[in-house]
Image (cartoon, helix red, strand yellow):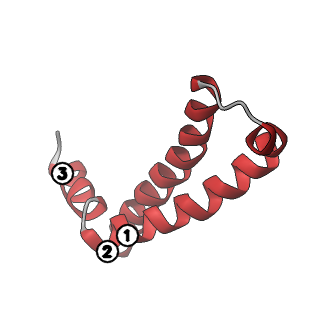
Amino acid sequence: MSDEARGALAYAVRPAVLRRSASIALIVGTLLSAANHGGIILRGPWTMGLFAKIVFNCLVPFIVSAVSAAANRENRL
């Protein structure tokens, strides 16, 4: 792993960046899940497949936010 990649990873796992990424993921993931699966979420039943989709709806914005923060940090240096 290059020094640049190590630095970006170290920045992305800082507590402040993780908190911000988690907040964004929770908001965006909730909106995506409600828009895409709202009926089944309210009606049930919850299957493992549905649960996996909801987790994925939160995981993707978390990763995008953390990577974007690291990339933005690299651009400012």
Nearest the camera: 67 or 52? 52
Q: Is residue 40 left or right of residue 22?
A: right
Tag 1 residue = 19
Marks 1 and 2: CB-CB under 8 Å? yes
Tag 2 residue = 16
Tag 3 residue = 6
**Amino acid type at image mark 3:** Arg
- Specify few, some or many for label 2: CA neighbours under 10 Å numbering under 14, 14-19, or 20 or more: few
Where residue 35 appears, as percent x and y from the top left, is 81, 49
SS assignment at label 1: helix
Give the residue drawn at x 49%, y 68%: 23
Q: Is residue 32 left or right of residue 38?
A: left
SS assignment at label 3: helix
Measure the C-alpha gap from mark 1 to mark 2: 5 Å
Mark 3 or mark 2, earlier in chain: 3
Measure the C-alpha gap from mark 3 to mark 2: 18 Å
